[in-house]
Structure formats: structure tokens, C-alpha cells
Image (spheres, rainbow, N blue to C red):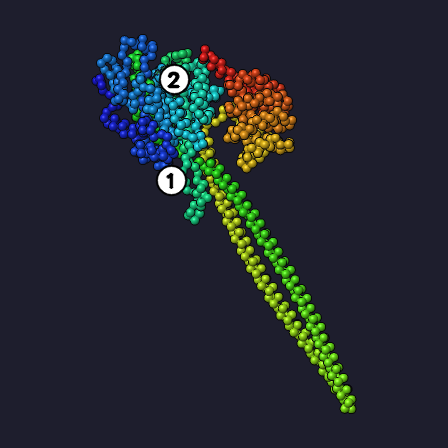
Amino acid sequence: MASGSYRNGGPKLSAKLDRQHSAVYSTPKASAKSRPPATPAAASSLRRSGSGNPASTPASNKGDAGVPGRVRVAVRLRPRNAEELVADADFADCVELLPELKRLKLRKNNWDSETYEFDEVLTEFASQKRVYEVVAKPVVESVLEGYNGTVMAYGQTGTGKTFTLGRLGEEDNAARGIMVRAMEDILADTSPDTDSISVSYLQLYMETIQDLLVPGNDNIAIVEDPKTGDVSLPGATIVEIRDQRNFVELLRRGEAHRFAANTKLNTESSRSHAILMVHVKRSIKGRHDAEPSLPRENGNASPLLSSLRPPIVRKSKLVVVDLAGSERIDKSGSEGHSLEEAKSINLSLSALGKCINSLAENSPHVPFRDSKLTRLLRDSFGGTARTSLVVTIGPSPRHRGETASTVMFGQRAMKVENMVKLKEEFDYKSLCRRLDIEIDKLIAANERQLKDFEDEVERIRADAQSRIAEAEINYMNSLENERSKYQTDYLESIKKLEEKWRMNHQSSNNDKTRVAHEQCLEKTCNIEGSTASNSEEITRVGQLLLNEKLLRESTEEVNDLKSQVLHWKNLEASASAEIIKLRKMLDNEANQKQKLEEEIRILKGQLLQLSVEADKTRRSLESGGSGKSLTGLDSIMSQARHSQLRDSGNGPKASIAKLFEQVGLQKILSLLESEDADVRIHAVKVVANLAAEEANQEKIVEAGGLTSLLMLLRISEDETIRRVAAGAIANLAMNETNQELIMAQSGISLLSMTAADAEDPQTLRMVAGAVANLCGNDRLQTRLRGEGGIKALLGMVRCGHPDVLAQVARGIANFAKCESRASTQVLSVL
Ligand code: ADP
Ligand code: MG
């Protein structure tokens, strides 16, 4: 081929590449300006307008086959090193770069060369910042939006793969590599309140996956979800990242273990693949377009249910792969390896080459299953991830063959097409938690309403009874009054009548005397007969009068009784009206209660359904494998925490949390100083349970809980209190800041003292656990040794209980680890 010709640069392909470029990535400059987006929704709309590709919006991607996204490939040239400056002084470089045209010329000889086109061409002067922005930044931004992403370096040993990806840049900030810069961007764009970032760091050597974070973990299995095909490593350690310092420390630890593992296995890092996995989990709020259809009543969602929509989570993964050197290993067995070993060393790399060839040629079968590396990278090539590859080359004409094969690998990878897909799902677990809380609230409110209602009914009943009793008394009183009044009137009128009668009788006597006197004068003879008839008449009139009087009085009495009866009837009618009203109220309340019970029953049904779904999701997640999230050290601590909860004998965690909310931490802590020993025991148990939750630990320490617990160790005579207090301190001692506070407050001598006094193995286990945690802190080593901590730890061996021995062993292991780190640092300083 004539000089200046290039392999894949025909106008047709060139046009295709340009189109795909704009469809898949926003340009680094544009995206740098766009950050940080206010909300994930804003971020996606930003990307939408930037890319001009509506199909890339998360909502529309969900559930479909994804958006095409070609693997992007950049080539980076390393500057001549000292040896090459001397050895190749008289020769030209084997490559010539044309960065503005994104082309690379590979010299065949002095007069002939071949040209290749890449997505980016990075010269020997390209800064680490520029390399990050061109190669990795678009992938990192994509991961932050919920897509999987891969950044990989391929090239001959010594061409700068580790320089590009793994430099920590501690000595020179500008030298920071892709791993460090990617985490900086991820941490800046996420919030610990809603998002979580965790990493695994692994090495793949001779088809064995080793954990670079926990070196003993050296044969990790790959698990594939048979349904989704998703690959995971449940055996790998996953460490939650909170800040950049924490991450850099982890990378440094991984590098040290990689060095140690390679020394032990008599290998070099150039023969192994290093794989960093960053898991990003983000909660998406305020999204209503993608809500699931919840059960509805009468076609309308109840307001309660509409407030209980499942939140959305995006779980994406950034994989950074520092591949083994691409040079061929001498088949006869270089570096003391047998032929079999030599084959398996590069099995993964050659399998990767075959897969990329198959994908580039669109062949129906891609041999992903041929090696562990290709199984792990299944999503990165031909899968759903955005993938960016940087191929590294050296300038030396002596390595022209290796450089040419590296360039060809990059060219083939550029033809691999992925279908990027949003990794978004509903967070049913947290919905279940919310529903549980909501139902508890409803039950409590319902119970309160029921109680109020019963109280009200009781009150109305008592009120009515007292009113009836009052009316009865009033009636009796008025009846009595009337009766006595009529009696008095009656006696009065009798008296008057008698008086009248006496007066009449007297006047008739006077008349009789006068008539007799006159008749004597006239010599009368009939006087006696007329006097007798007068007296009879008067008696009869008097009798008539009396009868009439009695009749009148009885009529009045009857009338009065009639009006009383009427009054009573009225009273009775108003009382029955009141009773009817009360019955109606009772019926209403009973209906309302029935409705509430119905609503609770529906909610419970829905909760059950959701729990079943959540279980299913969890089971499928678990069978997909979510990774082991505890280190060996953490798992021991978690066991200690569980047994401590058992010891404390206090109900479920939830009720403690509730108590914590209701009573308040300050109040609980003040109970630690109570006069009553029982109260003190309960209070320390509650504090121990709270301290078992990482989220509470900072609050407990801020409120002076740690000081109070140490004070209990100092003054308490009661072994139970000392045991539970030591357990709580062990939990608080999991955190580095707390460890230093414990030391500052003479915690180690108090723990030593407790260890010396205690006989109960559970107390010794707690104390040993606390000291073991302190032993993991590099800064406390000298003081631990000087203040008798290590002596006390070893002293606890006397107990012989396996739990205590396990904690002592952990402590000694932690201590030894710190010691060895310290001596490694001293050595490296020397
Ligand atoms: P690899 O990981 O590919 O084997 P390294 O990253 O270890 O290669 O690089 C080999 C050497 O070259 C290291 O000393 C590194 O500092 C140096 N080096 C690599 N790339 C560059 C570069 N772009 N600029 C300066 N030095 C480089
Ligand atoms: Mg390397």
C-alpha cells in the first residue's frame, strides 16, 4: 500500500463514525460546562438537548432494547524513555501521530507507512487531565446517569496502561490517573443522603480471580443470572466509599496486595489483569411518569396510596480494567512457567481478542465463555455498557510488531457496537418499609379514634342519666310542694267555713232571743217550733257549702295532676329524641370504624402483595448476587453486634428506634446515671442497641454517650452493666474518630481494668472486641502498646472461650497489619 493510505478511513466509514460519535457521547467540553445538574431529571434533559437523541432519555429506554453505542477507542503514545533515548537515538519513531486528523501513521520502513483513524489520538505530550476528559469522562457521566460503563487500557507492557489508569498522583497532583479522577467526579456529583458508592478491586491471574482488598480471598467465582445474563462476583469484598481519601487509601492497599500476591506467585503485574468495579446506586425522586399502577378504588387512586409510590433507584457500574501486557509470552515457558501455565496466563487476553473479532465481524457466535475475563466483560463488549478503550503504544521501532498488533486490536474494537441501557428499577424494599410505617400510624390513629368515640358515648350516656335523675327529683319536689300547698289551703278554707258557721249560729241565737222577748210581750205560744226549723236550715246550708268546697278542691287537684302528667310526657319525649340522636351518632361512628378497618385490610393486602414482589425481586437480586459487603473484620463485628442484641434482651430493633425517637437520646443517656440499678441496666442496654446501628453512633458520641459508657466501666460494680457498656464501646470503636476519642478518655486502661476483673466470657468477648477494633487504627499503635492494651488483650486468652479467642486473634491480626504497614512505610521512606 502506498504511503499515506489508511486502513479504515474510507469516506463511508468516516461518516458513520462521526454520526455515531455525536449520538453516543456529549463532547467533554459541553459536558464539563453542564455539571453539576440540579436533579437527575435535569441531567437527562440536558443530555437530551446536548445529544439531540430523544431515545436516550431514561424513561423511554426503560424496558426496551437500548440505544446503539459503539465502543470508543483512543490511542496514546508514551514518550521515549531513558533507555530508548539512548538505544533508538539514531532511529525515527515507528509511529507518527496526526492528532488534529485523529490519525496515526505506522511506519513500515523509511518510505512506506499505513494510516489508521481513531476516535482520539493522544500524543506523548497529552496531559493526564486531557486523557481523562477524552477517554473516561463521558463514560463516568453516563454511569452517573444510570448506565453501566467500562474504561479499559490495552497495550504492550511498559507503554503506560497503569500510568494512564492507576496513577494516584500523590507526589504530583497533575499525574492523577483515570481511576482517581473518575472517583472525584462521582463523589462530586452524588450525595451521601440519597446515593451510595462502593467498590471492589480484583486481580485476574491464570484464570483465578483474587481479591485485592482482602488478600486471603483468592478464588472468587463468577455468577451469571440465567434470566438476565448479568454477571456478578458475590465473593468479592465491597467497600463503601465516603470520601476521596478513603478511596485512594483503598487503591494503595490494593496495589500493595497486588505486589505481594505477584511476589508470592512468582508473577509480575504485567501478566495479570487488574479490575476496579465502582457500584453507583442513586435514588431518583420526583418522577411521576414512570410510576407503577397501584390498585385503585372506584377508578381513583386514594390519596393515601398516591403518596406511597415506590421510589426509583438506578444501579449502575463503572468497570476500569488495566489489562495484562499484550506482548506474546514465549511458548517454551518464560520466567520458569510450564507450557500449560504460559497458555493460561494469556488465555483471557487471547479470548478477549477472539470475542472482539467475532463482534467486529458480526458473527453469530461470540466465545464469551472461553475465559473469565470475557465472561466478566460480557456487558462491556456487545452488551449494554458504554465502553471506552485506550490503546497504549511506545515509539520504539524495535517493538514495531507489538505496536502494529496493538493498533489492529484498537481498530477491531472500534467496530464493536453496544446497546446502552438504563439500569433503573423500582425500590420495592423501601416502599415496603414506608407502607409498614404508614399502616402502623393508621392503626394507632384508629385506636385513638375508637377510644375517643367510646369516651364520648360514655360521657353522653352519663349526661343523659344525670338529666333524667334531675328531672325525676324536680318532679317529686314539685308534686310534694303542690300537695302541701293544697293541704294548707284546704285546712284554711275549713277554718274559714267553721268561723262563718259559728258567726251564723250566733246571730241566729240573738234573733231567737229578740223574737221570744217580743212574743212574751205579746203573750206568744209558738216560739220553739220556728227556732228549731231555722237551726236545721243553717246546718244543711253549712253541709252543702262544705261539700261544694271539697268538690272544687278535688277538681283543682285533678287538673293539677293532669298538667303534671303532660309535663312528664314532654320530658319523656325529649329524652327519647335525645336517645335516638345518640343511637344515630353511634351508628355513624360504627360505620366509620368499619370503613377504616376495611381500608386497613386493603392496605394489608397490598403490603402483602408488595412484600411478595419485593421478596421475588430480592431473591432474583440475590441469585444474581450482590456481592459480599463485609470484610472478614466486619463480619466478626456484625456477629458481635447480633449476640449483643440477644444479650441485652430488649425487643426488636424497631421498638428501640421508636423509643429513641420518642424519648430522645439525651434522656436515655441521663438514665445511665440513675440511682436505680435496674434503670441503669435498661438504659445501658438501650444505648448498646442504638450504638449497634451505624447511623446512631455519631449522635451518641456527640451527646456524650461515649463518656458516660466509659464512666460506667470505671464505677459500675455490676458485671451486666460493664458487659453491655463494653459491647456498646466495641460498636462505637468501629469508627476511626471514635477510636481516638476512646484513647483520649483513657478508654484502653478502663477496658484493661474491666478485662482483669471480669470472669464472664461474654464480658471478655465484648472487651476483646473493643480492643481489637482499636488495634486496627495505625495512629494508636504506640499508645496501645504503652498503655497496656496489647497486654490486656493477650491476658484475655486465659478465659479459653472460643468467642473470646476469636476476638483476641482479630485484635492481634489488626495490630500486626498496622505494624507491617508502618514498617512498609518506613522501608519506602528509606
Ligand atoms: P504498563 O502498565 O503498560 O506496563 P506503565 O504504566 O507501568 O506501563 O508505564 C511504564 C513506564 O513508563 C513507567 O515508568 C511510567 O511512568 C512511564 N510512562 C508511561 N506512560 C507515560 C507517559 N505518557 N508519560 C511519561 N511517562 C510515562
Ligand atoms: Mg501496568
Please tell me which residue lies in front, 408 or 355: 408
Few, some or many C-alpha atoms within 10 Å of disc 2 (few <14, some 14-19, many ≥20)? few
Q: Quadrant of residue 69?
A: top left
Q: Which amino acid does label 1 sit on?
A: Asp
Mark 2, residue position: 172
Please tell me which residue lies in front, 82 or 783: 783
Please tell me which residue lies in front, 219 or 77: 77
Q: Quadrant of residue 48?
A: top left
For residue 530, above or below residue 373: below
Q: Which amino acid does label 2 sit on?
A: Asp
In the rendered view, does 728 fall on the left or right side of 209?
right
Where residue 461 appears, x then y in whole percent?
59, 54
Residue drawn where x is 38% and y is 26% of the image = 185
In three-dimensional space, the C-alpha distance between marks 2 and 1, rounded to whole angstroms, equals 47 Å
Please tell me which residue lies in front, 350 or 821: 821
Where residue 679 appears, x then y in whole percent?
62, 33
Number of numbered markers: 2
SS of the residue under disc 1: loop
Q: Does the residue labelled 2 lie within 8 Å of ligand 1?
A: no
In the rendered view, does 507 fall on the left or right side of 19?
right
Residue drawn where x is 41% and y is 27% of the image = 187
Where residue 277 appears, x then y in whole percent?
41, 25
For residue 145, above or below residue 299: above
Q: Residue furthest left?
A: 2
Mark 1, residue position: 289
Q: Quadrant of the N terminus?
A: top left
